[in-house]
Image (cartoon, grey):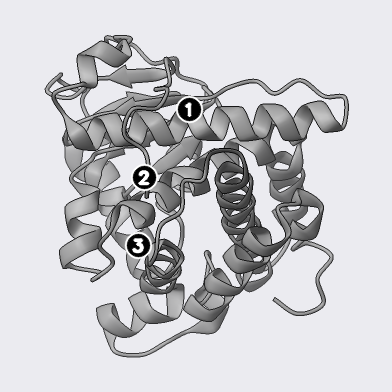
Amino acid sequence: MKWKGRRQSRNIEDRRGQPSGRRMLGGGIGTLIVVLVAMYFGVDPSFLLQGLNSAAPSTATQSRSAPADLENDPLAEMVSVVMADTEDVWHEIFAESGRRYVEPRLVLFTGATESACGLGQAAMGPFYCPADQKAYIDLSFYEDLRKRFRAPGDFAQAYVIAHEVGHHVQHILGISGEMRRMQQGRSRAEANQLSVRLELQADCFAGVWANRADRAKGILESGDIEEALNAASAIGDDRLQQQGRGHVVPESFTHGSSAQRQRWFRRGLESGNPDSCDTFSAATL
């Protein structure tokens, strides 16, 4: 991916090396058990963390990193450039429909950090918190992506950021809030299916970003699309469940199968149009 020498986002909070600022629920064990159980049964742990502390403001020290602060850290610099690209793309898309895009912030942290949705941990992977409109990532996740999930490459890394920004787009459009209202009173399997549709739409929005950013700035190089598709496949629910417990339980999916994640990313990539990402009306995912 061509990213060097381009604009970096100013919406970066660098909390790496800072303490989380607050103990975990129940002295630490409570939240950890909740997260591990959720991950085992295929439930998105970020939803649970939102419920644990959705009303609590973050008290962690927040620092704004100017682009110059990231120049000696290539990975953080690349992430900042990708974030800037998402800003440019979504500003353009929202303007086309007469809307104003509100930029999210991206928090870089080490180990654990507070969010308005509760305590975020590196073990959860990247997540988006609608309560504070921030995406969170411990950059060590990319090492896991490369080694554990066998999905290397800078464009695979960019796809992860674009997916979380896709959740921000869903939030400010009211899609994620409506989805959570639809989940109320439904069975676990039905609620999970709605979660899958939300996640696949975020994958599609990531594809829309890739299309528009390449059209405007020529960011794609040979092999980049394959990197993103490989990453989408690597973190499909069926693949993760097969690796984690030796069998697949489709009704417990919360993010979509490998094939579904690839399919919806590709749909957004080929169209460049967020209107093509209506997973909630799709008869087949």
User: Marks 2 and 3: which is nearer the front?
Assistant: 2
Q: Secondary structure at mark 3?
A: helix
* 15 w.r.t. 228: above or below: above
Q: Earlier in the sequence, mark 2 or mark 1?
A: 1
Q: Position of residue 32 (x, y in %)?
A: 24, 47
Amino acid at circle 3: Met
Residue 21 in sight in this render: no
| CA–CA distance in space, label 2 to label 1 | 18 Å
Earlier-in-chain disc, 2 versus 3: 3
Quarter the C terminus occupies = bottom right
Seen from this angle, which residue lies furthest right?
98
Return the residue nearer the eye: 156 or 23: 156
Question: Which residue bears the numbered disc 1?
Answer: 84
Reading the chain from its start, which is encountered first: label 1 or label 3?
3
Identify the residue position indicated by label 2 in the image: 126
Q: Would residue 223 be visible to someone looking at this image?
A: yes
Q: Residues within 10 Å of mark 3 (few under 14, many from 20)?
A: some
